[in-house]
Image: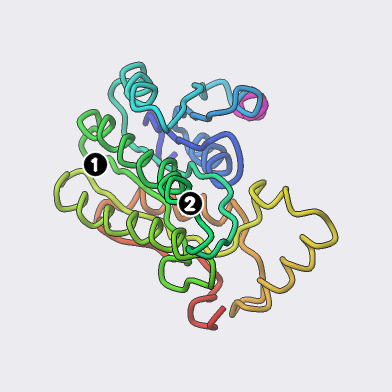
Amino acid sequence: MALSGQRIVIIGGSSGMGLASARAVSAAGAAVTIASSDQARLKAALAGLPDSCDGAVVNTRNEADVAALFDRVGELDHVVYTAGDTVRPQPLADLPLDTARDLFEVRFWGAVAAVKHAARRVRPGGSIVLTSGTVAVRPAPGTALAAAGAAAVEGLTRGLAAELAPVRVNAVRPGAIRTPLWDPVPEPRRAELFATLADRTLTKSIGEADQIAAAHLYLMENRFVTGTVLTVDGGSILAGG
C-alpha cells in the first residue's frame, strides 16, 4: 500500500473531511493520529477506525496543546490540517473587532502552530497539507473575514513551501462539501441550500468528504508537488458560483 508504515497526523480528524482522510490513509497502510477539540467526537471517530489509529484532544487555540501533540507523536511523515469552526456571514460593520480576530484563531493561527511544531519532525519525502476554501477567491457579501482567512492560509502555504523545503507544503481549497459543519442548518432548509449550491457548480453536485480525502492522498503521495493550492470545487469558481 502506498502509505504503508508511514505516520500521519490529522488535526480536525474526528469529523468531516479530516475523518474521511483518516479512513483513506489508514486504508492505504498508514498509522494515523487524529486530533480534535471534542472528546466525545474523538471517541466516536476512533470507534470506526482501525486499531492502527489513535487520537488526542487538542485545543488548537492553545500552542502548548499543539506542541504536546507533536512531542508525543515524534517523527512523522505527513500532517493534514482541516480544523475549523462554523463561520456565519456577517457584514464587517456589524462585527466587533475581537470577534473578527477570533475568526482567525482556529483556521489560520491553529495551522501556524501546527506547522511550527510539526515541521522539524517530518521525515524526508513528507508533507504538510493545509485547508483554505473557494471563499478566498470568490467571496460573497458578509464573508470578507472568512475570505481573508482563507487567502492568508494560501499565502502561508506558498511561503512555507519555500521556507521549509524539502518538506512539501500544499493546501486544498474545497468548495461546498457535505460535512457536519452544515448540521446546524435545519431540514428542509439544508436540502434547499445544497440544491442551490449544487446548481452553482459545473458538475451540478455538492462535494463529498471522500473527494477531499482523495486530494489529500494525492498531495501526500506526489513528491513533485509543493507550494500548490489544489481546488476541489466541482467547477464552482468557473461557473461563477
237 relative to 64 in the view: left or right: right
Frontmost residue, 203 versus 31:
203
- Magenta-drawn segment: 44-49
- Residue 206, position as x, y percentages in the image: 65, 65
CB-based contact (under 8 Å), mark 2 and mark 1: no
Q: Earlier in the sequence, mark 2 or mark 1?
A: 2
Above or below for 210 versus 69: below
State the image quarter where residue 39 is shown: top right
Residue 45 colored in magenta in the image: yes
Q: Residues within 10 Å of mark 1 (few under 14, many from 20)?
A: some
Q: Secondary structure at mark 1?
A: strand
8 relative to 191 in the view: left or right: left
State the image quarter where residue 110 is shown: top left
- Residue 109, position as x, y percentages in the image: 35, 42
Above or below for 79 versus 204: above
Q: Secondary structure at mark 2?
A: loop
- Name the colour scheme: rainbow
Frontmost residue, 123 versus 90:
90
Q: Residues within 10 Å of mark 2 (few under 14, many from 20)?
A: few
Q: Characterize the magenta stretch by its predominant secondary structure.
A: helix
**Which residue: 36% across, 61% down?**
151
Above or below for 78 versus 153: above
Amino acid bearing label 1: Gly
